[in-house]
Amino acid sequence: MTRAAATLAALALAATAVAACSPATDGTQRGDGSRGADASPTAPEPGPGGDGRDPRVVRVVALGDFGSGTDGQYDVARAMCRHREREPYSDVVTTGDNIYETGAPEDFELKFFTPYRCLLQRGVEFHATLGNHDVATDGGRPELAEPAFGMPARHYTWRAGPITFVALDSNGWVDDGVDEAQTAWLVRRLRAARDRPWTVVAMHHPIYSGGAYHGPTPSFAATFDERFARLGVDLVLQGHDHIYSRARSNGVTYVVTGGGGAALTGCADPPRPRVARCESKLHFVELEATRRTLVTSAIGEGGATFDRYDVPRNRDGSLDP
């Protein structure tokens, strides 16, 4: 048994002893996962709590461009663990580049299992998306096959309380120019999510970004902007640029969270269009949701919140493209 496999076995055993309220993926399309998962496992609505906290609040943490094995990654990971002691959460969604430089399985131990052991041992579940570095090894299949990354397919949906998450493989649109099968799947899933209070999309390549290095992905605004607006997406989580930025377009909020541990790449000067805030900081982002509110908090490696934003509900979601 490899060290990573032994670590996963130990973590799985520990997790069974911990009450976990997060939704679990159903395991369909494990491995290649090229078709996508239509199943949307449902977490139970929050129940009464005995710690004085509002039982209606669900928290999810978002993280991107992190799997570097650097001191920066480990600093952010420790901040995430400390934050969970104050503000409990059961799920982490990633915006890709989970394992640098190539998504190779021999890097999983140092760049994933070790830094996040304090979360994995307590039953926190990861729900990853694939970045451009992740697919450099066998198209991303090693990560898809590893249960700890929580990807039942290259694109899939899952739910946490009032939030429906739609995870995409944006490499399909970048590499091929158009991903018709995933686009059809996306429209189907967004229409199905309309009865839920909040819809959040997670993907790697940004539609809108304040970054100086990559910035917005060419053609993505034309591909996604109006479609997301009309199909009721409230928030899009993105990575690729190693920064934090927040933008808004056509009723949809766009957040880049790419400061999970890789070397920072800086904000554009002057600021890019539609970008309201940009910070070149190591960080993670907390989503705090009730049926009526969705709040994002960008939290630095030292644990301090440097941007807090009340996400407005997308009012155009009743329309079709």
Image (tube, helix red, strand yellow):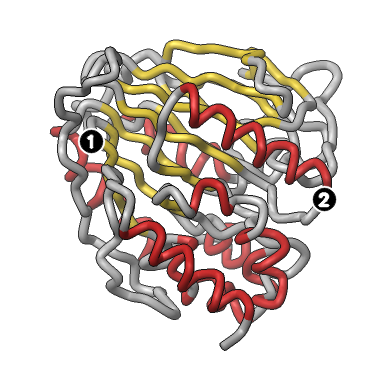
User: Which mark, residue 38?
Assistant: none
For label 1, the residue is: 320
Foreground residue among 226 and 115: 115
The residue sitting at 66% across, 58% down in the picture is 114
- For the question of whether residue 216 can be seen, the reply is yes
Query: Which quarter of the rendered picture does the C terminus lie within?
Result: top left
**Can you say which quadrant of the picture contains the N terminus?**
bottom right
Q: Nearer the viewer, residue 2 or 204?
A: 2
Q: Is mark 1 on a helix, strand or loop?
A: loop
Q: Which of 38 and 114 is in front in this view?
A: 114
| Label pair 2/1, CB-CB below 8 angstroms | no
Residue 289, image x, y percentages: 33, 22
Q: Is residue 180 in view from this perspective? A: no
Q: What residue type is labelled 1?
A: Asp
Q: Residue at x 47, y 45 (%)?
A: 93
**Disc 2 secondary structure class:** loop
Vertical relation: 32 (above or below) 77: below
Q: Position of residue 296 (x, y in %)?
A: 48, 20
Which one is in front, 124 or 207? 124
The residue at the point 82 percent across, 50 percent down is 70
| Quarter of the image where one finds residue 219 | top right
**Mark 2 against mark 1, which lies toward the viewer?**
2
- Does 201 sit left or right of 293 as displayed? right
Q: Which residue is drawn at 49% across and 59% down?
A: 169
Instruction: Kindly indicate the quadrant of the structure image that contains residue 74.
Output: top right
Q: Quadrant of residue 55?
A: top left
* Residue 70, label in figure: 2
Q: Where is residue 2 in the image (x, y as percent from the top left)?
A: 61, 84
**Distance (Cα) linking label 2 and label 1:** 45 Å
